[in-house]
Amino acid sequence: MPYGLYFSIAGLGIFVAAALWPPQRPRVLANITYILGMVINEIPHYGALLLAIWLGISIVSGDFGTPADITVAVALTALVAAGLFALGWRARTSRAIVAAALRDAGIEPARSSNEHATRRGWQITLFPFAVRPRSVVRERNVSYGPHRKQQLDVYYRKDRPTGGPTLLYLHGGGYFLGSKHHEARGLLYRFADRGWVCVSANYRLRPQAGFPDHMADAKRALAWLHEHAGDYGGDGRRVVMSGSSAGAHMSSISALSQQDPRYQPGFESADTSVSAVVGLYGYYGPYYGDDWNAALPSSPLVMDASSAPPFFLTHGTVDNNASVENSRELAAKLRAEAPTRPVYAELPGAQHGFDLVSSWRFEAILDGIEDFTDAVLPVSVNRR
């Protein structure tokens, strides 16, 4: 009897179930299912490959002693394969969802349309991990302030084309953890390869730092980019601010508080303007323990959006770390108050952290971000 095969398939089934039906509560169970299902949710075809390998080894090894063994193995395999197919199907719908969100905002999709075949489709399928292109240089650990945490990495193309837009990315982690070395590698690599100057910044974290410190760091990194983008060939007048989770929270507040001295103490006159925002699975409510009516607003939902720059927001429907409701509320607020209609793409079956690997879903989002930035920035980007 192939007990090893049964246990392997059952274990993969647990990962698939965690990806398909992640609970919102209790918090401990939500965190466990997030960890279990995060990777398989983005690359279900690798799970299918494992199933085929395990089953093939058992057949070749002659592990099936009775017809009952074969029946159980086939039933388990079929059940898990159906779950993997569902995960893959949900991920593949992302391209159509992003295209529809762009059209809703008055932007005609090019790369993100269903008819557009992604140029890296096979590469992503076979190797779903972001690899820095040879054309892109990363300059590490550049200081943007006096604190040891105030460091950033700069990504730019080796030939240093001039006049490209700039992008500041802030990582997630609930303000407790995270690093500039992880999330959204695909975003930074792709836009740097297009001739942008891209920056990924660390910032001070809890419990040593609080909301004013986080925001001051975000603003200081933004001011650094305005001042130094030209050193790398970038145009500091065109800055897209982006982030995942907590990073999206800071990016949205930064965009709605441009030049507000309360958020940039000690460097009040520095340029902290933002041309556009890209928020990935963001949390947009008030900061830990803050009141909705705090003197220093810590939620974009209570801030004036009448002068907001263009926003691109995307969130997964099964996110059990930051509720999709937050993104829905911010998108609704921007539709009602902002000068331009936001792009809001709500992704069926997407979980928190979908930018950690180069998946079909994240590739569709990157194509959409390219369409968005081409439309909202005043000058087209430097292409390759």
Image: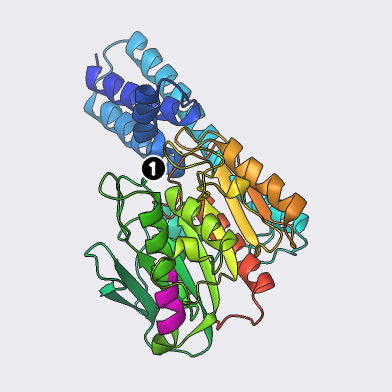
Q: Nearer the viewer, residue 17 or 216?
A: 216
Q: Residues within 10 Å of mark 1 (few under 14, many from 20)?
A: some
Q: Is residue 6 visible?
A: yes
**Image side of residue 225 versus residue 239, left or right:** left
In percent of width and height, residue 296 lies at 50, 51
Residue at the image position 22 percent from the left and 27 percent from the top: 61
Residue 250 on the magenta segment: no
Q: Where on the picture, by quarter, is residue 279? A: bottom right
Residue at the image position 24 percent from the left and 23 percent from the top: 62
User: Circle 1 — which element?
Assistant: helix
Q: Which residue is mark 1?
A: 46
Q: Where on the picture, by quarter, is residue 337? A: bottom right
In percent of width and height, residue 156 lies at 39, 80
In percent of width and height, residue 124 lies at 44, 57
Q: Which region is colored magenta?
A: 222-228
Q: Nearer the viewer, residue 38 or 359?
A: 38
Q: Where on the picture, by quarter, is residue 373? A: bottom right
**Image side of residue 34 versus residue 146, left or right:** right
Task: Give the quadrant of the N terminus.
Answer: top left
Q: Nearer the viewer, residue 58 or 311?
A: 311
